[in-house]
Amino acid sequence: MMNISKATTRLWARLGSCGAYGQAMLEMPSIDESMVACTADLCFYSGLDRFSKQFPDRFYNVGIAEQDLVGIGAGLAKEGFNPFVSTYASFATTRALDQVRVNMGYMQLPIKLIGLTSGCSVGILGATHISIEDIAIMRAIPNITVISPADCTETVKAVLALANYDKPVYLRLSGPMNCDIVYPEDYDFEIGKAVTVREGSDYAIVACGVMVATALKVAAMLEENDGISCKVIDMHTIKPLDTDALDSLNGFKKIITMEEHSVIGGLGGAVAEYISVREGFPKLQIIGIEDYFAHAAGFNELIEEYGLTADKVYKRITDK
């Protein structure tokens, strides 16, 4: 069993979500004898370099062939294996969409599809690598669980939880190296169960992925500058949505969603679909990336441009 300490969580944060994924995968063979790892020529970026050397009989590099990656994962799943297949999120959810839709959605094969460097993580590689529509695509396909961890600790906990999860999953990994730490080492992760990371009674921010850390900063600014008590919920599982957590917000003055994803079809859309047909919910403000293609730039530059820094989100909330 993995020994997790404060030092471990700091190490994961330095490595970033992909590195943390690779660290978690080193534990998987001891948890699940049927587990195998596949990647599309991203041994280093997927954090699986050590895994490939330590468990060569459980590792498959299919090359730059994302459709084959998912298809091979499907074949392995049909034979009783528990495949974790990883590649860039932008290609996992678009180039391999037919295989994802049929093998994971229709056939319900328990493939764990790991979307590496989603959102703005590797924007420096170009617009084609910026994945801001993947949540919308994946949650529209029936039978697929969609998870977006808030930090590297939650990433590791989510991967370990998937060892005994017999459904198809899309795990969205995002953020830079040296990322913020949201959770302590003893945090317990549960698929489908949102986490209240800050209590409040006036406004509520429902966030996912790297925006959870930003949401905590914004909530502190709202309380300090405006006297607004702001609750923050980490909605790490976007499908199925934790509707009990949303029901707890009935009667709040305002709900804000925050995501490093398009404002179309992501977390904000999922929340809107639920609360719009129910009484008692307040106005909803969806904060994310507007409907346009980005240019090549680094993570921090794109977050600034998209208006997703704590200062800019705070201004957007208080200007409304």
Image (spheres, grey):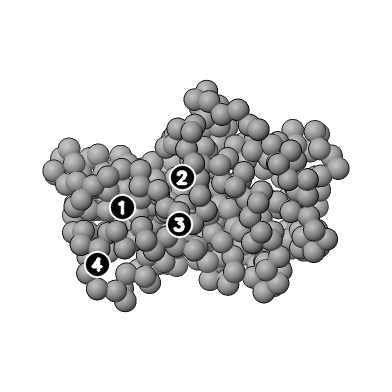
The disc, 1 or 2, on the residue closer to the chain's N-terminal end is 2
Q: CA distance from mark 2 to mark 3?
A: 14 Å
Q: Which residue is mark 3?
A: 261
Give me the residue at 77% from left, 60% from top. 77
Foreground of the two, 318 or 216: 216
Q: Which residue is mark 2?
A: 150
Give me the residue at 45% from left, 32% from top. 184
Identified by mark 4, the residue type is Phe
- Mark sitting on residue 192: none
The disc, 2 or 4, on the residue closer to the chain's N-terminal end is 2
Q: Quadrant of residue 58?
A: top right
Q: CA distance from mark 1 to mark 4?
A: 14 Å
Between label 2 and label 4, give the one nearer the viewer. 4
The disc, 2 or 3, on the residue closer to the chain's N-terminal end is 2
x then y, percent, for residue 161:
59, 47
> Are the residues flagged by discs 2 and 4 in contact, CB closer than 8 Å?
no
Query: Above or below — where is 67 with respect to 180?
Result: below
Foreground of the two, 35 or 10: 35
x then y, percent, for residue 128:
59, 56
> Local crowd at mark 2 within 10 Å, few (<14), some, or many (≥20)?
many
> Are the residues flagged by discs 1 and 3 in contact, CB closer than 8 Å?
no
Q: Which residue is mark 4?
A: 281
Foreground of the two, 57 or 122: 57
> Are the residues flagged by discs 1 and 4 in contact, CB closer than 8 Å?
no
Between label 1 and label 3, give the one nearer the viewer. 1
x then y, percent, for residue 59:
80, 45
Identified by mark 3, the residue type is His
Q: Secondary structure at mark 2?
A: loop
> Are the residues flagged by discs 4 and 3 in contact, CB closer than 8 Å?
no
- Asked if one can make out residue 5 in the rendered structure from this viewpoint, the answer is yes
Q: Which residue is mark 1?
A: 205
Between label 4 and label 3, give the one nearer the viewer. 4
